[in-house]
Amino acid sequence: MGENLEPQQTPQSRVSSNFNDRPANQMVDMLVLHYTGMPSGAEALARLCDKDAEVSAHYLVDEDGAVHRLVDEDKRAWHAGLAWWRGAMDVNGRSIGIELVNPGHEFGYRTFPEAQMTALEGLATAILKRHSIPPQNVVGHADVAPARKQDPGELFDWSRLAAQGIGMWVSDAPPVCASALQMQVMLTAYGYDVSDLTAAITAFQRHFRPAHVTGEADGETAGILKTLLDTV
């Protein structure tokens, strides 16, 4: 798989035993981004390869831009856990998972370095060339598990990825007045699990309105969501 990447982004293989087969005839149609949420990259890499941890990802991207391939793309890595997107619960079965080394909200959340973002862009671009993944299905862990997860968080630059054709972004949207029920309908239409509506709105804001993560459905948030739905 590394042959489709730029030389400086060719993955270093370190095999994780934490994987299984994808469901029969299941095509990859999602890309899920995470942060590791651990004090160091070395600890994260060790955990992703620890059979007792029962967690993994297809790739780990370190802060210096080093890319580690842990699970082959044709296998089901264990990165999303209990998740839901666009009506499907087995997110692991249909996705590629990328972990980005970052301490996360628990250990000193910080911005993602240039080298890491550059490496991610190259890796994600190559993945999208290999699989039919629509922009709407390039998501964060928080998007598919809003009641449980925050990653990759409000400091992650989704707009930068979208500018490279990776995922979706709205830079300017007119405000819209929307009731809680209307927000629920629109979020469901985009892909979110709205069983906890506040959590779903918070996850949406972390992704698409990171400067205003409140969990409240204000006009700006509703406007961004409506504009996104108009483009999918």
Image (cartoon, rainbow, N blue to C red):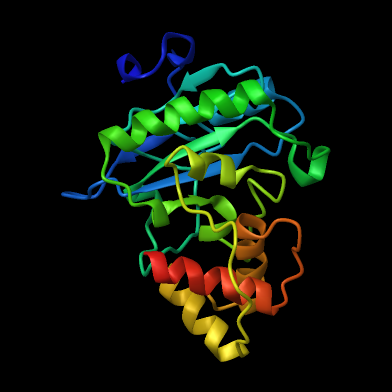
Q: Residue at x 39, y 28 (%)?
A: 71
In the visual, does 46 lie left or right of 226? Answer: right
Coordinates of residue 37 in the picture (x, y in percent): 70, 39
The foreground one among 7 and 41 is: 7
Q: Is 128 above or below relative to 150?
A: above
Q: Is residue 191 among the parts visible in the rendering?
A: no
In the visual, does 29 lie left or right of 174? Answer: left
Q: Is 30 above or below relative to 180?
A: above
Residue found farthest to the right: 108
The foreground one among 79 and 180 is: 180
Coordinates of residue 68 in the picture (x, y in percent): 50, 20
- Which corner quadrant of the image does residue 172 belong to? bottom right
- Which corner quadrant of the image does residue 11 belong to? top left
Q: Residue at x 67, y 54 (%)?
A: 150
Number of numbered discs: 0
Which quadrant, please, contains the N terminus?
top left
